[in-house]
Image (cartoon, coloured by chain):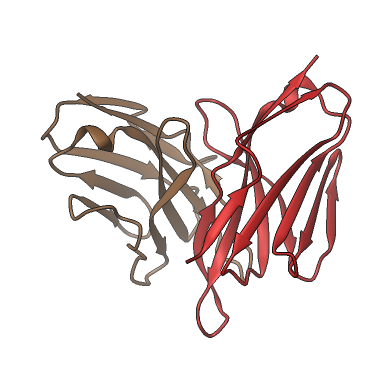
Amino acid sequence: GAGVSQSPSNKVTEKGKDVELRCDPISGHTALYWYRQSLGQGLEFLIYFQGNSAPDKSGLPSDRFSAERTGGSVSTLTIQRTQQEDSAVYLCASSERRIGANVLTFGAGSRLTVL
Amino acid sequence: SQKIEQNSEALNIQEGKTATLTCNYTNYSPAYLQWYRQDPGRGPVFLLLIRENEKEKRKERLKVTFDTTLKQSLFHITASQPADSATYLCALIGTNAGGTSYGKLTFGQGTILTVHP
């Protein structure tokens, strides 16, 4: 596609429910990132996929968070048993894999509100 | 531990002046540094990339410097305009023990720039 597409753009859920957030990266981009941005805060790295390599999951805050990337394209971030502190904007980005220069193109984000 | 710090949370300047934003880092050996702009309700947008062997990079009214000795990058907007008002983020890629960069891009907390007419 022309840009990085994320869905849903807004999600309101009740504490304890599971949510799935979807990211459709730019066609041909081999790298895909998920970040979380709480209100007024910076970007918190969650997970990074690069081609067929094992993902870098070092930023996932707990085992309630997981992500997968199917066929090297679409990615889904799943949050199980949501908590109020999970409320944030979840941003996905993709990039071409270049030696020494991963320039990211971001989606508009999925705003999650946990009541 | 690795840390990226941007000089201030907010910067207010008058239209026409030069805005200067600072990004300091510790315990990184970055091959390059990036700057992004973020508008409310949107994802960050890439502006400029500067490599470790480049002292300065320019793009229209933007100028970035990179001092690997001071571990600092300065981001300048000359002849600033109200449309430049946004949050500006610096970002670095880490390197492993062997000095090879890997893909995880880490962002500073951002500086909110407001340009007053």
Q: Position of residue B64 (x, y in %)?
A: 79, 51
Q: Position of residue B74 (x, y in %)?
A: 76, 50
Image quarter where the C terminus of chain A lies is top left
Q: Residue at x 52, y 58 (%)?
A: B105
Q: Compared to A110, does A22 lie above or below?
A: below
Judged left or right of residue B46, residue A17 is: left
Q: Position of residue A104 (x, y in %)?
A: 56, 51
The shade of chain A is brown
Q: Residue at x 66, y 44 (%)?
A: B7
Q: Which is more toward the observer, A35 or B76? A: B76
Q: Position of residue A102 (x, y in %)?
A: 58, 60
Judged left or right of residue B116, residue A86 is: left
Q: Compared to A64, does A2 lie above or below?
A: above
Q: Report how many numbered discs are placed on residues in the image.
A: 0
Q: Residue at x 69, y 64 (%)?
A: B71
In the image as oriented, which residue stretches furthest toward the top?
A: B117
Q: Compared to A84, does A44 lie above or below?
A: below
Q: Quadrant of residue B81?
A: top right
The shade of chain B is red
Q: Which is more toward the observer, B74 or A78? A: B74
Q: Residue at x 81, y 14 (%)?
A: B117
In the image as oriented, which residue stretches furthest toward the bottom?
A: B98
Judged left or right of residue B113, residue A20 is: left
